[in-house]
Image: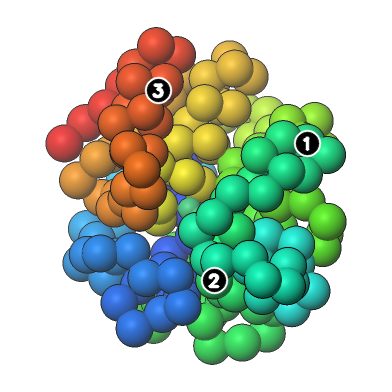
Amino acid sequence: MRPATDALIVIDVQNDFCPGGALAVAGGGEIVGGINALMTDFPVVVLTQDWHPGTHLSFADNHPGAAPYSLTDMPYGPQVLWPAHCVQGTHGADFHGALRTSAAQMVIRKGFRPEIDSYSAFFENDKVTPTGLEGYLRARGVGHVTLVGLATDFCVAYSALDAARLGFGVTVRGDLARAIDLNGSLAAARDQMAAAGVVWQG
Ligand code: VGL
Ligand code: ZN
């Protein structure tokens, strides 16, 4: 077991991000076994769950005429328009069936406000609205977070960058994460994480 100050944050290992899902990430299902095994090493385990209302403005369907994966301008900056995914209460929003969810003490839901997306586990995409995860981790005395899950270049990377900005030590297990890789987003995310001092393993 790692020290009491070490947390594992499992990002969005949900059906819609796995093969067969609405926003499937290639290889998304193959990381589940390794994540389950890693959970046993950590005293603090948190899961995040992308949790959108059907009216969410990150969905291309809610912008008539807009194509999935195109960009739009939101008050907080550019926003990719995604296929509808992880709609609250649907099978797509459920965790992957093999994920050992019982090992987690905390589930953070994010992206529930229709007008703002939330990639990061810490802040919504305006970079100021908190999810509550920082307070939870600090209250439990956490100083270092290890991140795994989906997708490497969106929710994992945004979470890693926010964690580093908040002063946590941050490791991303690249072998237990998979990327969407939209227009070079994986290379850009890896550069930003490296510049922020995030340790990449795997
Ligand atoms: C994610 C796109 C939209 C992710 C969530 O989990 O990386 N990506 N919503
Ligand atoms: Zn989403």
Secondary element at tag 3: helix
Q: Quadrant of the C terminus?
A: top left
Q: Residue at x 32, y 38 (%)?
A: 184
Q: Residue furthest front?
A: 65
Task: Check residue 76 in the rendering and tell me which mark sits there, or answer none.
Answer: 1
* 110 with respect to 187 (left or right): right
Across and down, in percent, residue 119 comes to 59, 47
CA–CA distance in space, label 1 to label 2: 20 Å
Q: Earlier in the sequence, mark 3 or mark 1?
A: 1
Residue at mark 3 = 193
Near-viewer residue (96 or 92): 92
Q: What amino acid is labelled 2 in the image? A: Pro
Residue toward you, 25 or 1: 25
Disc 3 and disc 1 in contact, CB within 8 angstroms: no
**Residue 124 can be seen, yes or no:** no
Q: Residues within 10 Å of mark 2 (few under 14, many from 20)?
A: some
Q: CA distance from mark 3 to mark 2?
A: 26 Å
Against 143, residue 94 (above or below) is below
Residue 96 % position (x, y): 40, 76
Identify the disc placed on residue 83. 2
The reply to whether the residue tagged 1 has its Cβ within 8 angstroms of ligand 1 is no
Residue at (54%, 71%) from the top-left corner?
Answer: 83
Residue shown at 34% from the left, 83% from the top = 20
Does the beta carbon at disc 2 come under 8 Å from ligand 1?
A: no
Residue 185 is left or right of residue 51, and the answer is left
Residue type, label 1: Tyr
